[in-house]
Image (cartoon, rainbow, N blue to C red):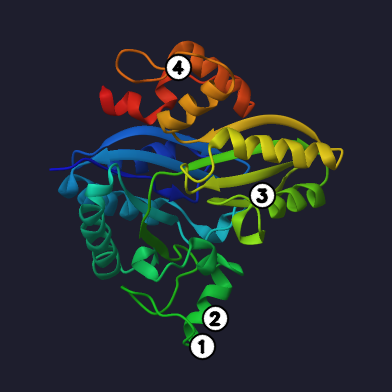
Amino acid sequence: MPLLESVPNLSEGRDRATVDAIAGAFATAGARVLDVHLDPDHHRSVVTLVGDERDLEDGLVAGIDEARRRIDLRRHTGAHPRVGVADVVPVVPLTAADFPHAVVVAQAVARRVGDDLGLPVFLYGELGGGRRPAYFRRGGLEKLGRRIAAAELAPAHGPSQVDARSGAVLVGVRALLVAFNLELRGTLEDAQAIARAVRESSGGLPGVQALGLALGNRVQVSTNLIDVDATPLHVMVERIVAEATARGADVGVGELVGLVPALCVIEAARAAGVKSPTDETALPTAAARVAAARSFHLESLDDDRVLEWHLRA
């Protein structure tokens, strides 16, 4: 039975106890939690877990149930757009051959969350006609409710009303991606202009989604690299830095949200001149991780931030 990944995004990034309880619920059926990333500015957490089909399905339903019990969107404020307590729940095949298995799990989770938990569920990606999460988040939770009432949208499962406390759940199947943020010392207008310049939908780099966000007195370019083959991570970062420099904005620290595929580290290391970037197990060497961290503007890149390190273990 293949191993599948899921990376649920939770609308809580400040209360560690709440996030740990939800992560524990994800693991109750036997799935293994690899990473928990809290972001207080985005007020969002990203949990990375792996498991076989049944363990992952049961664990995701249990974790979403725990999230709806513990999180109240009526008291939520954060920089990142969201429409639910368990905002996005992607199921990720680790090989192309596992895609049909991921579809089965995602469809089962969507049905159970709608029928058993009573939350409206929308399908995105290949399960939802190619629509991305941003399509549903446009205008926020209140706008989503109005779009449902106007029959513009209809949940695939669950009720046709969204509760202000729990919202909706977006379920999909996607390939491995990298969530990466880069802090700037500039204006929000700078960050938004840079995001437009790099994201694919505005004519930028293929496979790149990007937003310019304000985080208190700081600004950030927040990205999802949804096709690591089309645009290597280090190339995307170089483009953001170049766009920032052209606008007179200084570049701060980078941030990896969750785990990074080994391929991204190896490619960055090779581009930086590391001649032997992998060890005998095909994982990035310490030298490769140091070089990649420099390319990604990270303070460090430990081995446990690499997805395959966990899978090999």
Are the residues at dot 2 and dot 3 in contact (C-beta closer than 8 Å)?
Answer: no
| Residue topped by disc 1 | 150
| Residue topped by disc 4 | 277
| Residue topped by disc 3 | 198
- Asked whether residue 107 appears in the rendered view, the answer is yes
Residue for point 25% across, 70% down: 115
Which label's residue is closer to the chain start, 2 or 3? 2
**In the drawing, does residue 109 fall left or right of residue 219?**
left
* Real-space Cα separation, disc 2 to disc 1, in angstroms: 6 Å
Q: Amino acid at mark 4?
A: Pro
Front-most of residues 93 and 279: 279
Above or below 145: residue 38: above
* Real-space Cα separation, disc 2 to disc 3, in angstroms: 32 Å
Are the residues at dot 4 and dot 2 in contact (C-beta closer than 8 Å)?
Answer: no
Quadrant occupied by the C terminus: top left
Are the residues at dot 2 and dot 1 in contact (C-beta closer than 8 Å)?
Answer: yes
Of helix, strand and loop, which one carries label 2?
helix
Front-most of residues 267 and 51: 267
Residue 130 at x, y = what percent? 43, 67
| Residue topped by disc 2 | 146
- Asked whether residue 217 appears in the rendered view, the answer is no
Q: Residues within 10 Å of mark 2 (few under 14, many from 20)?
A: some
Which label's residue is closer to the chain start, 1 or 4? 1
Which label's residue is closer to the chain start, 4 or 3? 3
